Amino acid sequence: MSDEFRVVFALYPGVTQLDFTGPFEVFARLPAARCLLGSVEGGRIQGDGGITFADVVRLEDIADCALLCVPGGFGTIAAIEDQVYLRELRRLAATARYVTSVCTGSLLLAAAGLLAGKRAACHWAWRESLCAFGATADPGRVVRDGHVITGGGVTAGIDMALTVTAEVAGIDYAQTVQLAIEYAPAPPFDSGRPERARPEIVAAARRRLDAVRGARDAAVSRAAASLPAAVNARQAQGQS
């Protein structure tokens, strides 16, 4: 690897922009950092809220990275069965110093065979889907297991990125970055976790997610069923 600290955000259509733009603001401030947005096709990527990102690099054109970050989003439902995308995650993760995710990005790491036997965080409404891939769902906002560091839903990506920054550059440096971006959460409501929100609020949030629940669960089941074959094929290629 070069002397730069290369950070790769592995994107896909329908990604949630805050899942990676939050960590991007933190990681871009690391010493010698070079942040790259990558996807299977490269070019332009549209997020699940309609925002478009241009000049995205093809993942296969990125030789390696010090840190891999996989964001979540409703596009996870399709990406979890994209074997080219999952192959690139495995390749980049193989030599990365840190493998990270935000929100449902941990399901993509799991589908790539990178979380078997590990604890991981995920968005609260999708968390238990990790178990289908042999991972242990952890309700923590930031969860570390070896060099894999996963964040919970969306905004937890900033916490995850600051956690990694403290390890890479020191606690004082991480606190300086936190101050620079004025990250001092003071939400107007204490309803950011299902155990804190009123029951009727949790129910309303779940109803909004029910529209994709069937497609999500089916995609997870298919991805989990195909994982052993994909991993075995990868190991065979490495031995040939």
Image (tube, helix red, strand yellow):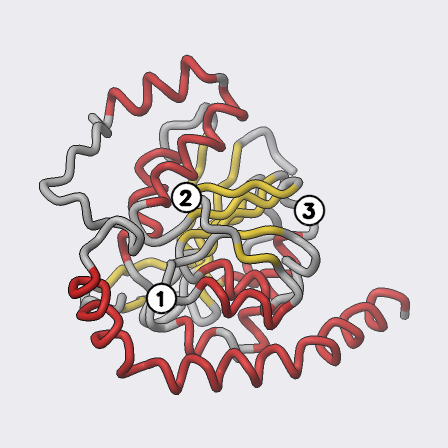
**Residue 112 percent across, percent down from the top left:** 62, 66
27 to 130, vertically: above or below: above
Q: Residue furthest right?
A: 240
**Residue 154 percent across, percent down from the top left:** 32, 52
Foreground of the two, 104 or 124: 124
- 1 vs 2, front mark: 2
Which three-letter amino acid code belongs to the residue tagged 1? Gly
Name the residue that disc number 1 marks. 43
What secondary structure is marked by label 3? Answer: loop
Task: Indicate which disc residue 141 carries.
Answer: 2
Query: Local crowd at mark 3 within 10 Å, few (<14), some, or many (≥20)?
Result: some
- 3 vs 2, front mark: 2
- 1 vs 3, front mark: 3
Foreground of the two, 37 or 185: 185
Quarter of the figure that contains the N terminus: top right
What secondary structure is marked by label 2? Answer: loop
Foreground of the two, 35 or 215: 215
**Residue 180 percent across, percent down from the top left:** 24, 22
| Mark before the other along the chain sequence, 1 or 2 | 1
Which three-letter amino acid code belongs to the residue tagged 3? Thr
What secondary structure is marked by label 1? Answer: strand
Which three-letter amino acid code belongs to the residue tagged 2? Arg
Q: Residue furthest front?
A: 199
Name the residue that disc number 3 marks. 95
Mark-to-mark CA distance, 1 and 3: 25 Å
Tell whether 22 sits left or right of 58.
left
Looking at the rendering, which quadrant does residue 238 occupy?
A: bottom right
Mark-to-mark CA distance, 3 and 2: 25 Å
